[in-house]
Amino acid sequence: MDSTPQPPQGNANRARLSRRVRGLFALPLAALVLSGCSLPTFYGFKGVTTQSQSTYHLWQWFSLAAFIIGGFVLLLILYAVIRYRRKGDSIPKQVQYHIPLELLYTVIPIVIVFVLFAATVVVENKVTAEPKSSLTVNVNAFKWGWKFQYPQSNALVYGQTTQAPMFQIPVDTNVHFTLTSSDVVHGFYIREFDFSRYALPGITNTFNFTAVKTGTYFGQCSQLCGLYHTLMYFRVKVVSKSDFAAWVAQFNTKKGAARAEAGALATKQILSPGIPVIPATTTGQK
Amino acid sequence: MTDLLEPSSLSADSHGHSDADHNSASPHDGAHHEHHGATGILNWLTSTDHKVIGMSYTITSVAMLVIGGAFAMVIRAQLVAPNNHLVNFSQYNELFTMHGSVMIYLFAGPFAFGALANFIVPIQIGAPDMAFPRLNALSYWLYLTGSITMLLGFFTAGGAANFGWVAYAPLSDIINSPGAGADLWIGALLLTGFSAIFTGVNLTATIFYLRAPGMTLFRMPIFTWNLLVTGILILLAFPVLTAGLIMLFCDRHFQTHIYTQHLGGVPVLWQHIFWFWGHPEVYILALPFFGMVTEIIPVFSKKPVFGYKGMVFATLTIAALSLGVWAHHMFTTGVVLLPFFSIMSLLIAVPTGIKIFNWIGTMWRGQIWFSTAMLMSIGFVVTFLIGGLTGIYLASPPLDFFAHDTYFVVAHFHSVVMALVLGGMAGLYYWAPKMTGYLLNERIGKFQFWLLFIGTQLLTFPQYVLGLQGMPRRIAQYILDPGWQTLNIWSSVGGFMIGFSTLLFVVNLWVSWKKYPAGDNPWDAHTLEWYTTSPPPHHNFYRLPQIRSERPTWDANHPDSKALVHGHNEDGAGH
């Protein structure tokens, strides 16, 4: 649903109509001059990766368009409903067609759609780009947990449900991810990254993130995967580059190896049917 | 063309299809119009009359709405607290699976193309019955048995199906979902799938071959047009689902490897097959409801449909595009061509927008009578506008990446389907007098409308925000962020309002039972069904008016007003 025009008004109002059409285009243009950052959030979230910030701006522009178009159409409906409520038994003029008007509200939506599509393609290419990276994280989803393995080092974290694993990535670094599933379809979803991707059995999905803000963020399986889907969490901690190097290094020590082993043990624990315990120290930026 | 057509000559064209039941009917005349056949319960069980079958469909599908709604009430009750234990995880999975399945497969579809379409379409085109009355009866009985089959899942040891209404492989395979409930779910979909296919055959054949003399394609009411397109879409889409389900069943029980990860299977194939049916299905559901409000808005604005041919063109465009957008449900799989499916999906906004402007154009400068049917229709347009606009976001892959599988999507399609419920209620209030001979209580109806309309917005708006705050769908608890509780409570309040409004409808049926005689045409409506009696006689018409435009009844009742010839009406503004 889009666009501008109004229901049959007759020729007299066409000039006013075209002024309104121009106004519709002028508004976003004015907003553009004021730069995207001053737009309201529309309940969206400015992500903590470079990719998600592009997505967020696209969200703002789509929302602006939706609010203008939706508001305009709602006003038309409201006006019609109030202005043309029944006032007598006379039969109104039996208008059936108004070809120029109908063409107008066919052509303008097509134009709007292609503008939205162009913006989509630009942002999509940014979000799905996979520039060469020196750090890779292999993510594996399984019922009902996650495994994060770093092929360039010994680092490995995994856990399931109540032992939600936490993996780390360095800030301001282009990190490459591969995503697989061991059993059913899972969804790798991090709200602060404004991103989700299916973990599909038999298919390896790849994508890149460049996190720009340190902090701990929650991830959760977003695609129904069976009984404990509700509890399939993980956390990602974005840390400084030096902290990340130290974190990776500890996996080379005996103690670190033991810790990785302990992580493996944790996954063997029988799932508690009671209230799941989520550590309190895991709040992201909410 | 003669002014009045005798029903005997009319039905002679089509009587070849009728069964013994019909042939036993005595010739109809004004004094003695009762059909000689089985009566009472036996009539309901054996009838091939499209009106009886349409009523059976209506009753069954409204019952399914109540059952599916009851599941939703439990779901919303579960979500009022972050760590609620009203139901356990397993029960919750069953509940939302069966809520979605009952609403989509057993309510919305059968109500749209089985119930009202069955009753109204043949009358709107001046036909005595559907083209294949026995096949029509078979459709209903397959639908009823399918519905019972699906619900029986609750009585199996493993419980009902619990893999979501989309049944993604490999979650729906025998290892991950071993229960008999899953098999009953597949069986139910095969039964209702064949039911839908037969209805599609019937609608298409009826509309192409049983139109009364003078009822050209461009004089058909928009409701009939939409059901024609729906029938064709059913024939294109439903066999794909049925085939996909048979393959799923073979995977589960005959060791085939079509959707398995190993031995050459491709799990993601299920998603392609499912959504290749699933997206046209969205329009198979929606087009009949579009048709209903396109009947109602002109009648209660005392004007013809604005942009009739544009409306038809938009419907055809939506149908054509809907076959090429299935992968927008799969943007986050990473295995589909994003730009193609994005532009195809965005383009659907254009014909849908045309429809909305045409509805507004129909009201423009009219004399709007706010009956319950009209209020429900306006509620439909507003709610559908919201659902449509939020759908545009999801057609953009980057935005879908972060909204997919969150409550934003849940809110989006509930805006859409609740708009359809509003449209369906509009249809029931509008056509109930024709189907039963009695009007429904308008006061209760208007109260029901406000509850339903406000409840719908209260249900969905918090869900949009929750989705943007990161709440995934299909989770039984949200321990992660107890801050989501307030919005969930509001959403639940909206849900309960909708539930209460549905109960009010049932109350209204009871209160209005044989109370307000309707007469043939209580709304001064336009189309042929309002020319005959309420309810119509066995083969629908004693006589037909001249059909010179898309509103023959209006032309007959308003002899001073010139019949509209498309694009050349003299009292119109355009040409």
Image (cartoon, rainbow, N blue to C red):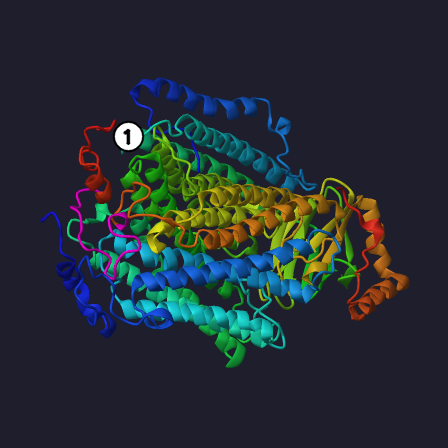
- Magenta: main secondary structure equals loop
Query: What residue is at 51 percent from the left and 53 percent from the top?
Result: B507
User: Is residue B536 shown in magenta?
Assistant: yes
**B441 shown above or below B21:** above
Determine the residue located farthest toward the left in the rendered image. B1
Determine the residue located farthest toward the right in the rendered image. A255
**B508 shown above or below A261:** above
Q: Quadrant of residue A271?
A: bottom right
Res B100 visible: no
Tag 1 residue = A91
Judge by depth and name the residue closer to the eye, B475 or B533. Answer: B533
- Residue B74 spot, x, y in % from top left: 64, 58
Q: Callout 1, which amino acid? A: Ile
- Residue A144 spot, x, y in % from top left: 70, 64
Q: Which residues are magenta?
A: B529-549
- Residue B413 spot, x, y in % from top left: 52, 49
Query: What residue is at 52 percent from the left and 80 percent from the top?
Result: B253
**B387 shown above or below B113:** above
Chain at numbered mark 1: A
Res B97 visible: yes
Judge by depth and name the residue closer to the eye, B516 or B323. Answer: B516
Quick check: A101 left or right of B510? Answer: left
Residue count near mark 1 (Cα–Cα under 10 Å), binned few <14, some 14–19, many ≥20? few
Secondary structure type for disc 1: loop
Tell me the quarter of the image containing the C terminus of chain B: top left
